[in-house]
Amino acid sequence: MPKKSKAKRENNGNLGFEVTLWSAADKMRNNMDPGEYKHVLLGLIFLKYISDSFEEAHTFALNDPDRYDGMEEEPDYFKSLNVFWVPKEARWEFLKSNAKKPEIGKLVDDAMIAIEKDNPTLKGVLPKNYARPDLDKVRLGELIDLISTIGMGDKESRGKDILGRVYEYFLGRFASAEGKGGGEFFTPRCVVRLLVEMIEPYKGRIYDPCCGSGGMFVQSESFVEAHGGSVHDVSVFGQELNPTTWRLAKMNLAIRGIEANLGSQWGDTFHNDLHKDLKADFILANPPFNISDWGGERLRDDVRWKYGVPPVGNANYAWIEHMVHHLAPTGIAGFVMANGSLSSNTSGEGEIRKRLIEVGLVDCIVALPPQLFYTTQIPAALWFVSRDRHDHKFRDRHDEILFIDARKMGTMISRKNLELMEEDIKKITDVYHAWRTKNIKYENVKGICKAAKIAEVEKNGFVLTPGRYVGTDVVEESNEIFEEKMNRITKDLSDQFMLSKELEERIKKNMKSIGYEVK
């Protein structure tokens, strides 16, 4: 399909443009921390995006005075087009023409304030600290000049589309630069692509309870468009705990023209569920792994814990049960989890997993290769939980779970990180859809995939590690989950330190008894 070839071109063909732009922008960062610089740069890209969108509609009205006479300066006209109204002092050309002036920081702040004032949906979203003394105004002007080049001379895509690509690419680069902290707002694009291609969110309500910068929603909308659907056929709901990440998400979705309900502000999904009554057709998520301080002790009797009360010391199964609770009667969820969730029996997790399996909710497990995430080296897997396993539209698979081992897939793209390539994503999704779909032949492939009966899973103690079922020469990871292992190692180390201290005191005492004092 033509749209597929366009997506491929946008993903790969012009990648050098984004790389070159990042390199140029990064040189201007000077000594600024990536976490701070992220907001400076992404705020400017967002500002250019909404200004370009405005100018396109503005020019269109000016060129057809018989039909749009006087409407080129009417805010309601732009709102009817789903375009943000941009007052004169906030338009990119005005800022560009003043980029070399010492007061450019204040002008950018004033522009952000004016845009928020005239567009209530952006209230409290945009960064407004460009005038601060520690931000080099010469470099700020250079950044404005650099961003002014985005979209110029590209004959195949509108400037706005390129700005969206640049924004997404820069999110990924900042996540990489920031390491662990960066992953709070960014899931690798290939992982999002795989989740979206697996569950195929063509039509309905899409939900992400920990949405980060909104990447799941961006890829869902791209999927719908690439397969000939309409973005109006999906509605988007999300929630994010971190206020700065929530703002990034609002900007990221606005830059893509995606309308989303992310709540009136950020909030804790467990303790302040902003979408309590939502039953979603599709859930996509990458919850933070192994969170111990999620406040579970205050939620012992919560309605969401239908399959067992999750442990206070780890939020993994709280996330799983929260998502199951929000699934529509025929809904499907795809989400990332630490591998420990596949086999842990700590504090009742094994019992919850057993019940989820016995009632037929667990559809598919995909073991992911290492080094995919910027944030952690903890091994991870994809869970697919579905309520459509008896649906007549699909193969009856109520007594099976599909296991896919993708640990050998992927290509190293840097010294530290690996990425799933297009052929890897296709290989995994083809297996899943062949197993799931009527009238398509599915076969188990040793080392790659197996549709295991629930009875076999029961014999394996309800452990969901794919390597146990597919047969593999990849060394099986220990069933001891990360927290348990670290707790054991820490306790052993503490015991050794205590013994060492006792020995040290004994030696000092003995030395003193023969007339030699050790300080």
Image: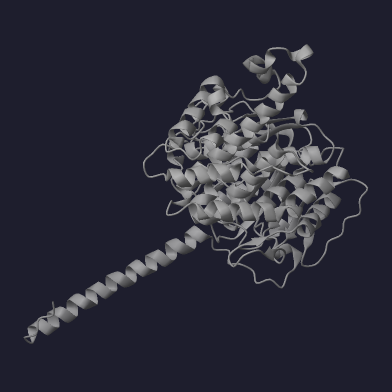
Q: Split into 4 quadrants, where in the image is the C terminus?
A: bottom left
Residue 27 lies, with reference to residue 52, above or below; the image says below
Q: Residue furthest right?
A: 439
Q: For this rendering, which residue is in front, 226 or 42?
A: 42
Q: For this rendering, which residue is in front, 112 or 327?
A: 112
Q: Residue furthest left?
A: 515
Q: For this rendering, which residue is in front, 225 or 326?
A: 225
Q: Residue at x 75, y 40 (%)?
A: 222
Q: Residue furthest bottom?
A: 514
Find residue 273 and report its horizontal and vertical position in percent: 54, 31
Q: Residue at x 73, y 37 (%)?
A: 221
Q: Residue at x 67, y 20 (%)?
A: 78
Q: Split into 4 quadrants, where in the image is the N terminus?
A: top right
Q: Is residue 368 visible?
A: yes
Find residue 35 and report its horizontal and vertical position in percent: 47, 48
Find residue 441 and report its horizontal and vertical position in percent: 91, 54
Choose top left, top right, bottom left or bottom right for residue 499.
bottom left
Find residue 371 and report its horizontal and vertical position in percent: 60, 62
In this rendering, would 121 be left or right of 474?
A: left
